[in-house]
Image: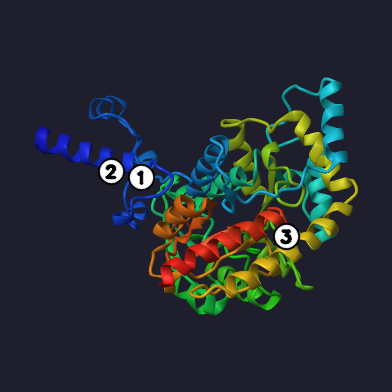
Amino acid sequence: MNQGRFRSRIEKHIEFEQMLSSTFYLRKHRNSHLHSPALPVISFQLFMNYKISHRAASLSSSLTLAIDSKAKQMKADGLDVVGFGVGEPDFDTPRHIKDAAIKALNEGFTKYTAASGIPELRQAIADKFKRDNGLTYKPSQIIVSCGGKHSCYNVIIATCEEGDEVVIPAPYWLSYPEMVKLAGAKPVIVQTSDKTEFKVTPEQLRAAITPRTRLFILNSPSNPTGSLYSRDEIKALGDICVEKGVLIMSDEIYEKLVYDGAEHVSVASFSKAHYDHTIVVHGFAKAYSMTGWRLGYLAAPEPIAKAIDAIQSHSTSNPTSFAQKGAVEALNGPQDHLKTWLEEYAKRRMFAYQKLNSIPGISCVNAKGAFYLFPNISKLGLNSTDFCAKLLEQEKVAAVPGIAFGTDEYIRISYATSMANLEKGLERIERFAKTLKK
């Protein structure tokens, strides 16, 4: 390729990515972040010198974190911003958990541990699976990681080869496809909609599986939609994966946050075959408000657990030592906070659901789990990126465009915030929506 033409092409690409590095993607390129490599914002010469890898260049940055960062900066600048963007409980970590970590810190528990976590915590996790899910795991099948995200990444890196396919229902948690690309595998996106409560059907899953399919990613309750698969729905999807020899990564981090008497069911619980095909990913962030502690875990068949242990030993090594002591207390200590939190989330969920559906041009299915709603804003005449950009600019409300989760007709609202913030933020959304309907 002619050097001048190549330089022009790269410089244009860098200029494009520089525009994308703002909180929201340029409106006239609203879908480009799904297709365009997210190169760092650097000069042509530095690009040539650094030789960024194709895998790194293929990634898009986390839009949820970008929006949260922008909202926090606006607040620091004195603006009255309501943040519905980040998926983080507004409650504090329960006192007994913090006390356990502080005690460990004060006692000098600050050294390296086993890469896969301290034995006490791995046993506590195994006990949790037996108690809550009817699943029997040995501590050697448990890997403690630096967050649920880290566990997901470890699973994908350990199980996927170059050219493998990974089936991901959309809307999806935005990091799943990026992790798959980092492994050299191909994300196969299966679109769902509010007509099916954003749940993939057995027919869709079967049609998406090919001889190259290695992994199916299941997230129930779901981020970003709050959807929850029933026992029969989970089993039907699991049956197909067992039949086809496809592994399942079951992300169950919102397990404790379900409403209206619904139940969470782990796909690994149906039979030995389901168990053998499933890696369960979990963590402490959502049920214990430990997002900043960076502790997650997974349970897997022994060969996969051993492979992940080896990967982690050469990447992060162990999770923070004294934080692990807090996690032991989280699992083994009092669980009283969960009832209080869930009651509060349920009130917020119903208020937000009713308010959103009262706004002309917006429709929303109710969540059955997690702490998100995923309203449809397509009748208001804007794509999700434009909607959220203008909403933040005009009304100082931060929400996440649905395109970040693979669909452009929706936005994500987190109700993991105070009722006062919900009332104020939703009033602003209503006011903004009315300007679009004129």
Q: Judge by depth and name the residue closer to the eye, 318 or 383.
A: 383
Within 10 angstroms of label 2, few (less than 14), some, or many (20 or more) residues? some
- Residue 248 seen in the figure: no
Quarter of the image for the C terminus: give it.
bottom left
Residue 42 is situated, as x and y percent measured from the top left of the image, at 31, 30
- Residue 404 seen in the figure: yes
Q: CA distance from mark 2 to mark 1?
A: 6 Å
Looking at the rendering, which quadrant does residue 415 occupy? bottom right
- Which residue: 79% across, 40% down? 327
Within 10 angstroms of label 1, few (less than 14), some, or many (20 or more) residues? many
Reading the image, the residue beneath label 1 is 20
Looking at the rendering, which quadrant does residue 308 occupy? top right
Q: Judge by depth and name the residue closer to the eye, 360 or 362.
A: 360
Identify residue type, mark 3: Glu
- Residue 255 badge: 3
Identify residue type, mark 2: Phe
Mark 2 vs mark 3: give the one in front: 2
Relative to 321, residue 330 above or below: below
Q: CA distance from mark 2 to mark 3?
A: 40 Å
Quarter of the image for the N terminus: give it.
top left
Residue 204 is situated, as x and y percent measured from the top left of the image, at 48, 75
| Horizontal side, residue 164 vs residue 113: left or right | left
Reading the image, the residue beneath label 2 is 16
Identify residue type, mark 1: Leu
Q: Are marks 2 and 1 in contact (CB under 8 Å)?
A: yes
- Which residue: 59% across, 50% down? 83
- Which residue: 31% across, 49% down? 36
Q: Judge by depth and name the residue closer to the eye, 205 or 13.
A: 13
Residue 283 is situated, as x and y percent measured from the top left of the image, at 70, 48
- Which residue: 63% across, 65% down? 226
Q: CA distance from mark 1 to mark 3?
A: 34 Å
